[in-house]
């Protein structure tokens, strides 16, 4: 079964805030060591309308409430939220609610129960669209109802998929379209293999929900040979850092690249103001 996912030419990605600060970069024009028109074009297009002033449309802004974008998940989600905030700036037509939380996931619901917290968030305010990025902390067994599920076993995958489905059902049941981001490749080969398993569960689960779009991020952070790379070339040919030193998270530059791509995909599944 094939999930409702953005096509390869869209070159999906995930993004974030780096360790050590939140300084905005003044020049952003796209990045990839190899051709990747999708994410570069997405970032450039959104920044172009912002820089040229075409974004701000007072009449349109007064005619409707801001589009509310809810971002939930782990530290990768936090970074995606920061990227969206950097990209959209002070545009009055958008409101980014960044509720990502570091060290959380779908395995340890005794530590942080995402379905319960999502119920609270939805009761406070129904967003127009949700962006979910989660899974980085889930390379561990699941214990539930006295049962033990060995990490990545078939039973584990079934249980993990059910937990992802619980979030998808809450959001789509409230009429909220969902962009569910897959986890990116990591520097560690062993860690990356775990992310492959988790991503496969997400894609298969998302396929059951018409209002959930699975967004892969893997290829955005690999080189021509499909290997992890922390760098990419921008439109001017300069080599730019897109990953932090831990080999898992994203820099501000990388997060804004992903945010631009997310916004492009979002325009296909949600009612966004025109650029």
Image (cartoon, helix red, strand yellow):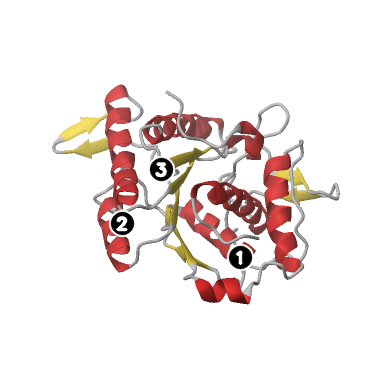
Q: Position of residue 56 (x, y in %)?
A: 65, 72
Residue at point 56% right, 45% down? 248
Please give left or right for residue 141 compared with residue 181 in the image.
Answer: left
Please give left or right for residue 121 compared with residue 227 in the image.
Answer: left
* Picture quarter with the C terminus: bottom right
Q: Is residue 77 above or below residue 149?
A: below
Q: Is residue 27 visible?
A: yes
Q: Residues within 10 Å of mark 3 (few under 14, many from 20)?
A: many
Q: Which label sits in the foreground, 2 or 3?
A: 3
Please give left or right for residue 84 compared with residue 77 in the image.
Answer: right
Residue at point 14% right, 38% down? 145
Q: Is disc 1 placed on a helix, strand or loop?
A: helix
Give the residue number, with chain letter if any, for mark 3.
211
Residue at point 46% right, 34% down? 199
Q: Is disc 3 placed on a helix, strand or loop?
A: loop
Q: Position of residue 125 (x, y in %)?
A: 34, 66
Instruction: Please report contact status of discs 1 and 2: CB closer than 8 Å, yes or no.
Output: no
Instruction: Please report contact status of discs 2 and 3: CB closer than 8 Å, yes or no.
Output: no
Residue 216 image-quadrant placement: top right
Q: Which label sits in the foreground, 1 or 3?
A: 3
The residues tagged by marks 2 and 3 sit, at their Cα atoms, a distance apart of: 17 Å
Residue at point 76% right, 50% down? 240
Q: Position of residue 72 (x, y in %)?
A: 41, 55
Instruction: Please report contact status of discs 1 and 3: CB closer than 8 Å, yes or no.
Output: no
Give the residue number, with chain letter if any, for mark 2.
118
The residues tagged by marks 1 and 2 sit, at their Cα atoms, a distance apart of: 24 Å
Q: Is disc 2 placed on a helix, strand or loop?
A: helix
Q: Position of residue 273 (x, y in %)?
A: 57, 62
Foreground residue among 153 and 118 = 118
Foreground residue among 97 and 233 = 97
Image mark for residue 88: 1
Q: Which label sits in the foreground, 1 or 2?
A: 1
């Amino acid at each position: 079964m094939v999930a409702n996912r953005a096509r390869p030419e869209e070159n999906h990605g995930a993004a974030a805030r780096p360790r050590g600060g939140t300084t905005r970069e003044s020049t952003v024009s796209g990045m990839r060591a190899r051709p990747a028109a999708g994410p570069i074009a997405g970032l450039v297009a959104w920044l172009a309308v912002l820089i040229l002033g075409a974004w701000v449309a007072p009449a349109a802004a007064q005619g409707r409430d801001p589009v509310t974008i809810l971002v939930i998940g782990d530290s990768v989600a936090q970074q995606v939220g920061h990227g969206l905030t950097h990209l959209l700036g002070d545009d009055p037509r958008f409101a980014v609610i960044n509720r990502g939380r570091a060290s959380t996931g779908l395995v340890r619901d005794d530590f942080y129960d995402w379905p319960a917290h999502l119920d609270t968030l939805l009761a406070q305010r129904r967003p127009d669209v949700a962006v979910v990025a989660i899974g980085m902390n889930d390379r561990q067994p699941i214990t539930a109802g006295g049962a033990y599920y060995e990490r990545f076993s078939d039973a584990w995958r079934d249980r993990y998929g059910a937990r992802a489905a619980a979030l998808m059902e809450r959001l789509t049941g409230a009429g909220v379209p969902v962009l569910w981001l897959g986890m990116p490749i990591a520097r560690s080969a062993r860690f990356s293999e775990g992310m492959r398993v988790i991503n496969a569960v997400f894609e298969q689960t998302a396929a059951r929900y018409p209002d959930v779009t699975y967004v892969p991020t893997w290829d955005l952070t690999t080189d021509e040979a499909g290997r992890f790379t922390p760098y990419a070339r921008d439109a001017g040919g300069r080599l730019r850092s897109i990953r932090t030193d831990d080999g898992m998270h994203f820099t501000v530059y990388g997060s804004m690249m992903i945010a631009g791509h997310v916004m492009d995909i979002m325009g296909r599944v949600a009612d966004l103001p025109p650029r």
